[in-house]
Image: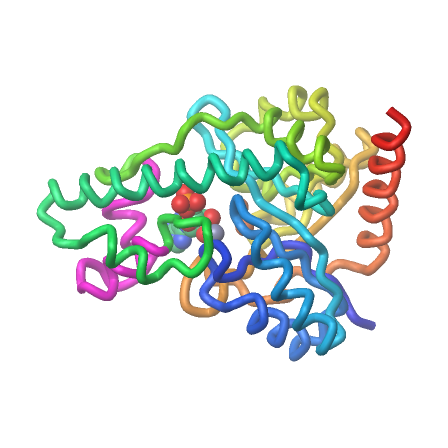
Amino acid sequence: MRFIDFHVHTSASDGSLSPGEVVAEAAKANLAAIGITDHDTMEGIFGARTAGKKLNVEIIPGIEFSTHFKRNEIHVLGYFCQEDNTSLRKTIDRLRSDRYDRMKKMVYKLNKLGIRITFDEVMTEVQGQAIGRPHLARVLCEKGYCKTLGEAFAKYIGFQSPAYVQRKEFRPVEAIGIIRGAGGVPVLAHPGTYEKVDFLPSLLRAGLMGIEVFHPRNNIRISYRFLKIALKCGLLITGGSDYHGDKNGEGTQLGAVKMDPFFLEEIKRLSRQLKKQKVRS
Ligand code: AMP
Ligand code: ZN
Ligand code: FE
Ligand code: FE
């Protein structure tokens, strides 16, 4: 039996492997399908599909939006969005330029702290559109300011660390609206990483359709708790490894979370329903 990993990053955002390389890894791990869920971009999907056709790995198109609620960062996954949707495109463009401006500010703050790095050095790490803190962390490590990416986050660029800069406000309900507007299925990512989930009722009202019940950062209690919520609210269940490649990220293995193909059929069914509703309205 071949399984599915619904949450995977590539070098289109802050993963260390190209889409083609990620798909090759997926084939080696005998996965039937993977969700390409890069931060704030869908540009890795094309390359992943090309490789996927050759290697018999199905590509589930996705995106992972970073949003804010009361100064907490909430991630919202969107599956099967229509990539050419105008509001989605506009949102992606806006987020890309926000990420760019924010990185400039972070480099400036680091310079003020006496750390000698430049914006151009960070850019040499970036292969796609979504410039992020892991790219900056890699430069900090290469230049000897820290030994691991975790240390870079803890000392300099993590939330509440001295060179942290928050991105422009983007609310989870807004992200849900954009995803649904593009015919996509919105799913709350890794609920185990949030201190409180007081935002959940508003997300449900906005049309949240699923919860990532299985994720390396959801312990068994969290998974159980959100499984019950998903069943009670009639939400879809997903799960994924949040793989970022071997060199960086949170250090999980591809396929560390494996889901039954049944769940892919479910998400496809919902996305077809949404698209039909859109045609009718
Ligand atoms: P950004 O999107 O620029 O705010 O960066 C957030 C990303 O950094 C997350 O999605 C993770 O991939 C990564 N990240 C966050 N915290 C850590 C950490 N402590 N160690 C390594 N990577 C991290
Ligand atoms: Zn990431
Ligand atoms: Fe995330
Ligand atoms: Fe992720």
**Extent of the magenta region:** 135-159
Residue at image location 67% in from the left, 43% down from the top:
84
Compared with 148, 190 (above or below) is above
Majority secondary structure of magenta residues = helix
Residue shown at the point (54%, 58%) measured from the top left: 9
The residue lying at 19 percent from left, 63 percent from top is 143
Which quadrant holds the C terminus?
top right
In the rendering, at what x and y percent does residue 120 appear? 25, 55
Q: Nearer the viewer, residue 22 or 48?
A: 48
Horizontal side of residue 4 vs 150, given as left or right: right
Q: x and y percent of residue 41 in the render?
A: 54, 48
Residue depicted at x 9% and y 47%: 114
Observer able to see residue 212: no
Above or below residue 87? Residue 199 is above
In the rendered view, would you say 237 is above or below 69? below
- Could you say which is closer to the camera, residue 195 or residue 175? 175
Q: Is residue 186 magenta?
A: no
Residue 182 at x, y percent in the picture: 71, 36
| Residue 104: quadrant of the picture | top left
